[in-house]
């Protein structure tokens, strides 16, 4: 008999060989996904600490890809939204894993409720330096014709330099700059006419309720996987819960 169905949302795992505990936690989480109780899994960006191209065929990447493929092979759909760390994930990764790649903004039907999904970085409109870099980095001509044709060794060096700059920027920028702006949240929710928004990126898990057009709406922020895992579980009854994964 099928148990109560649920849909899962995770983000900001920042998987890397240097973080074996978090990697093991993720692999265990995937292995426990049961098609009798999981309707779908959504990964809302930054699954990897860095992704320098689908041709980066390392043992570590193959392990993650094979684990995801094992879940989709069981009949559980996995939807993937690129984040600021893994925006170079492409169709080859999707084919190998069986994932469905999502656009940067996606409205889904969550048990009859329209819900907007984003990674979250575009909501941080006070971080103008990052948004300017994002606009350049997401240019398909730049990353296809200039970055992805470079040797993998050079791409790794560039990625390491970018991570160091990103960490320095994060550490030095005022806290409010690194968080979302309420005006942008309200604008995008009005644009898509939704009452629920789910995102990651900021690493500040919470349920935020506020008034929009005289209605109470909700912004749900997913947690980063620092010392343990975390997932948002949503069931058909409309219950949404952030749960720790150990």
Image (tube, rainbow, N blue to C red):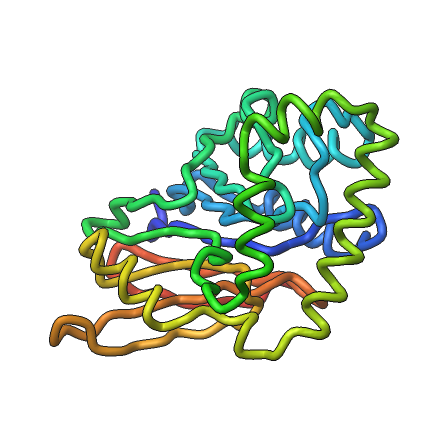
Residue at 71%, 29% in the rendered image: 147
**Relative to residue 1, is residue 238 drawn left or right?**
left
Residue at 45%, 60% in the rendered image: 232
**Relative to residue 135, is residue 165 drawn left or right?**
right
Q: Position of residue 50 (x, y in %)?
A: 72, 44
Q: Position of residue 185 (x, y in %)?
A: 34, 65
Quadrant of res 194: bottom left
**Relative to residue 104, is residue 176 drawn left or right?**
right
User: From the viewer's perspective, is residue 128 above or below residue 60?
Assistant: below
Q: Locate the C terminus by quadrant.
A: bottom right
Q: Position of residue 212 (x, y in %)?
A: 19, 72
Residue at 42%, 36% in the rendered image: 102
Q: Locate the N terminus by quadrant.
A: top left
Q: How many marks?
A: 0
**Relative to residue 47, is residue 232 drawn left or right?**
left
User: From the viewer's perspective, is residue 186 above or below residue 29?
Assistant: below
69 and 74: which is toward the camera? 69
Q: Position of residue 22 (x, y in %)?
A: 73, 56
134 and 244: which is toward the camera? 134
Residue at 39%, 59% in the rendered image: 198
User: From the viewer's perspective, is residue 205 above or below residue 72?
Assistant: below
Quadrant of res 143: top right
Quadrant of res 196: bottom left
């Amino acid at each position: 008999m099928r148990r109560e169905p649920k849909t899962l949302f995770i983000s900001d795992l920042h998987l890397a060989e240097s973080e074996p505990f978090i990697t093991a936690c993720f692999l265990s989480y995937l292995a426990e996904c049961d098609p009798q109780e999981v309707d779908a899994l959504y990964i809302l960006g930054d699954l990897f600490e860095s992704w320098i191209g689908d041709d980066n065929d390392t043992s570590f990447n193959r392990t993650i890809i094979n684990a995801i493929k094992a879940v989709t092979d069981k009949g559980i759909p996995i939807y993937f939204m690129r984040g600021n760390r893994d925006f170079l994930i492409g169709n080859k990764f999707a084919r190998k894993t069986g994932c469905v790649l999502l656009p940067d903004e996606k409205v889904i039907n969550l048990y009859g409720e329209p819900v907007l999904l984003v990674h979250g970085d575009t909501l941080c409109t006070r971080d103008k330096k990052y948004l300017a870099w994002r606009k350049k980095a997401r240019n398909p001509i730049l990353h296809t014709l200039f970055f992805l044709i470079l040797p993998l060794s050079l791409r790794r060096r560039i990625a390491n330099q970018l991570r160091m700059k990103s960490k320095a920027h994060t550490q030095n920028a005022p806290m409010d700059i690194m968080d979302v702006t309420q005006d942008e949240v309200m604008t995008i929710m009005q644009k898509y006419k939704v009452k629920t928004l789910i995102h990651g990126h900021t690493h500040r898990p919470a349920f935020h309720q506020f008034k929009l057009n005289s209605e109470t709406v909700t912004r749900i922020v997913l947690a980063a996987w620092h010392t343990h895992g975390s997932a948002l579980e949503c069931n058909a009854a409309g219950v949404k819960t952030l749960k720790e994964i150990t």
